[in-house]
């Protein structure tokens, strides 16, 4: 009899413990101490609790309630304050305290290996200026959140892998995206406000992996039955959106930086369709308007010279497609890297220069620094005159300059047979070139 009573009591205790555990307020990984919330904005706090349970959000002095599936969400207004903030979320049996929260500018940084490349560089592939950058990186007003590389065959609400919010310091920035860090650290200094960087990239990933199934299926068949989600994840359609982007929504961001395209360079026409579709997909799901989207054009790289000049395997066709995407993506900007790439080196070490150009786009188009030029010279027209050809460019009122004699220009007649241009000027007072 005593054994039976003990057993009943034990079962009851276990049931109470399970009920208590299930009742605890749960938050997504992004909502944690040391996070940066987009300043002067309406931001979402969300998470999970018992179905229909009432919660108290002390930061906004209002009550909220979990829905019948246990998910809750409340929108609160942030200010421009630079003071550290706290948020306490409580239900009937548990309480979560978030401390050292800052209001600032939040940017999502995504793409493939050139965005993923850490500040310290890859093995045998350096990041120029990394040693000094790491040494000077201590900054409590710059904060980093790293999304772990993982995929899924269906959309996830919770991040499976991540490194929680960290303050910028040598031990946190060395493994963090170099482009994201250089962009964020300079933005923080210029705006004199906190900056939060969310990094979610995967080397070798295709744009198809970053689209939702609903949108990608509008352009191609999406059938993941029989697909092993642990193999070639970065090539699997929708897999990275499902596991690395969807769990971030609806965390309010200011804008996004993107450096990807190498894995799609043989299909420029398809990329011209899918890339703008991806941007629109993300913007629609975030539901905060057409947030700024700045991206990097592929640098010159031979890709092993697999095919002849006219083939789509010439990455120049992808660069052209990326440039044309500007017309299809409102509130966007492109970074040109023709002077930074190398024929036989796919990861340009000048990550700071690339980040600078992304920063110029953001400063000019997002933050109102009209005097900061952000557009590279863009071909407009040509004229045949004075025994040569004059190329006219836009976005270069002060003219063009070359440190050395310009090389690599070729001219073709109606027969489309190219030959090297015989002469090119080094310094130009007008925005044009003459051959």
Image (tube, rainbow, N blue to C red):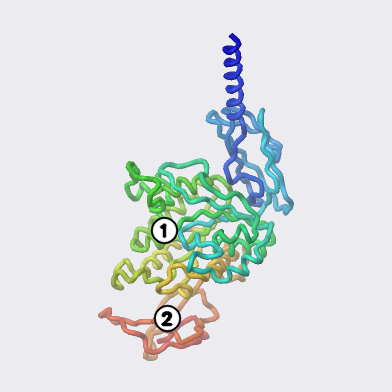
Residue labelled with disc 2? 391
Q: Nearer the viewer, residue 44 or 176?
A: 176
Q: CA distance from mark 2 to mark 1?
A: 36 Å
Residue labelled with disc 1? 204
Q: Nearer the viewer, residue 391 or 261?
A: 261
Name the residue at the left extreme. 415
Who's the residue at 46% across and 54% down the image? 279
Dot 1: what SS? loop
Name the residue at the bottom extreme. 386
Structural crowding at the residue carrying mark 1, measured as other residues with C-alpha within 10 Å and reported as few (<14), some (14–19) or many (≥20): many
Closer to the N terminus: mark 2 or mark 1?
1
Question: Which percent across, then down, holds residue 123?
Answer: 49, 65
Who's the residue at 64% across and 51% down the image? 36
Question: Which percent across, then down, holds residue 267?
Answer: 34, 61
Do the residues under discs 2 and 1 have CB atoms within 8 angstroms?
A: no
Dot 2: what SS? strand
Position above or below: 37 against 387: above
């Amino acid at each position: 009899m005593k054994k039976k009573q003990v057993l009943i009591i034990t079962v009851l205790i276990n049931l109470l413990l399970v009920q208590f555990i299930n009742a605890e307020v749960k938050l997504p990984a992004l909502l944690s101490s040391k996070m940066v919330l987009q300043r002067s904005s309406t931001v979402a706090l969300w998470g999970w609790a018992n179905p229909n349970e009432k919660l108290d959000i002390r930061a906004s002095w209002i009550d909220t309630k979990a829905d019948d599936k246990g998910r809750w969400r409340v929108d609160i207004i942030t200010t421009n304050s630079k003071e550290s903030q706290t948020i306490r979320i409580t239900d009937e049996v548990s309480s979560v305290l978030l401390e050292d929260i800052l209001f600032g500018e939040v940017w999502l940084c995504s793409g493939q290996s050139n965005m993923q490349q850490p500040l310290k560089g890859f093995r045998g592939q350096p990041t120029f200026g990394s040693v000094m950058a790491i040494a000077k990186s201590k900054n409590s007003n710059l904060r980093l959140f790293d999304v772990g590389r993982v995929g899924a065959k269906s959309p996830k609400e919770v991040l499976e892998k991540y490194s929680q919010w960290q303050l910028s310091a040598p031990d946190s920035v060395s493994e963090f995206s170099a482009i994201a860090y250089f962009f964020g650290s300079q933005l923080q200094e210029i705006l004199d406000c906190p900056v939060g960087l969310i990094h979610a990239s995967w080397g070798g990933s295709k744009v198809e992996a970053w689209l939702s199934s609903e949108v990608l299926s509008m352009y191609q068949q999406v059938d993941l039955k029989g697909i092993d989600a642990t193999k070639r994840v970065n090539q699997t359609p929708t897999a990275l959106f499902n596991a690395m982007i969807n769990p971030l929504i609806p965390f309010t961001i200011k804008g996004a930086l993107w450096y990807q395209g190498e894995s799609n360079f043989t299909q420029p026409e398809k990329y011209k369709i899918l890339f703008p579709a991806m941007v629109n997909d993300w913007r629609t799901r975030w539901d905060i308007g057409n947030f700024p989207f700045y991206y990097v054009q592929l640098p010159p790289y031979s890709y092993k010279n697999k095919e002849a000049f006219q083939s789509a395997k010439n990455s120049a066709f992808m660069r052209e497609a990326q440039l044309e995407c500007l017309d299809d993506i409102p509130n966007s900007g492109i970074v040109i890297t023709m002077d930074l790439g190398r024929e036989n080196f796919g990861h340009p070490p000048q990550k700071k220069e690339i980040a600078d150009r992304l920063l110029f786009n953001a400063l000019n188009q997002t933050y109102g620094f009209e005097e900061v030029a952000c557009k590279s010279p863009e071909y407009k027209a040509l004229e045949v005159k004075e025994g040569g050809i004059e190329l006219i460019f836009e976005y270069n009122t002060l003219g063009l300059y070359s440190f050395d004699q310009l090389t690599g220009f070729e001219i073709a007649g109606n027969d489309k047979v190219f030959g090297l241009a015989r002469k090119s000027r080094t310094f130009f007072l007008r925005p044009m070139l003459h051959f």
